[in-house]
Amino acid sequence: MAAVAAYPSAITFASKNVVSEPDGKSFADLGTPEADADDVPAALSLAVIANLQFLLENIEVFDICEGEKGYILHPPKGTRLAAGPINYKIAIGPLEIDLTIDLSTFSVSLKIILKVPILGGVTIANVVGNLKDGIEVKVGYPGLLGGIVGVKLDANSDVVLSWDFTAFGKGFQGSKVLFHI
């Protein structure tokens, strides 16, 4: 079985804004016997700081529409595309897309999650297909979401993510080249 390019386990979502020193403690003290082992906020802050450089190097911010930004968490730098499955995490408006591509078989897995206020994440689609044929998923959640999200290998050997959906009354349409083969 091929190795999967993975992100550090402590990474889910983080930003520069969440990094601050825990009350009354110095980051230099974290992880030492003097630090309280049960101090979850301190441990979480330490995990965020430890992975902040990774995030800064691997998150791409791009325009999606009318001043809105999208975010792509790329595989770790140095990951060989042909070495096994690679994973991308993409945020477009209220959609979170988890995309796994294996170039040795040209298989692709696409998981789409709608972030609903108060409820949290609701899985809308979880499909597997072939990158050469492309995957186009009709997404919908009554009253909240409707449209299409897809991924394909285009004629220029670019892996392209495309979307055209409306969520919470706002339209999102576009495409983004993730990488070139």
Image (cartoon, rainbow, N blue to C red):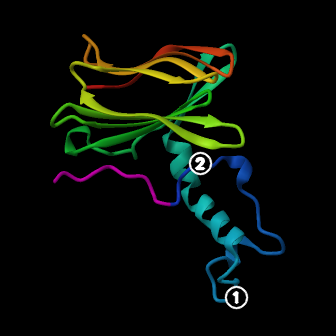
Disc with the residue nearer the chain's start (1 vs 2): 2
* Disc 2: CA contacts within 10 A as few (<14), some (14-19) or many (>=20): few
Q: Residue at x 69, y 83 (%)?
A: 35
Q: Position of residue 21 (x, y in %)?
A: 76, 65
Amino acid at dot 2: Phe
Kind of element beneath mark 2: loop
Find residue 13 and name its label: 2
Magenta span dominant secondary structure: loop
Q: In the figure, is residue 36 to the left or right of 134? A: right
Task: Return the residue nearer the eye: 121 or 134.
Answer: 121
Q: Which residues are magenta?
A: 1-9
CB of mark 1 within 8 Å of CB of mark 2? no
Query: Relative to residue 80, is residue 147 depicted above or below?
Result: above
At label 1, the amino acid type is: Glu
Q: Measuring 51% from the left and 23% from the top, which residue is drawn there? A: 140
The crowding category of the residue bearing disc 1, from other C-alpha atoms within 10 Å (few below 14, some 14 to 19, many at least 20), is: few
Q: CA distance from mark 1 to mark 2?
A: 28 Å
Give the number of the disc on residue 34: 1
Residue 111 to residue 130: above or below? below
In the displayed structure, 177 sits above or below 59; it is above
Measured as percent of width and height from the top left, residue 16 is found at 69, 48
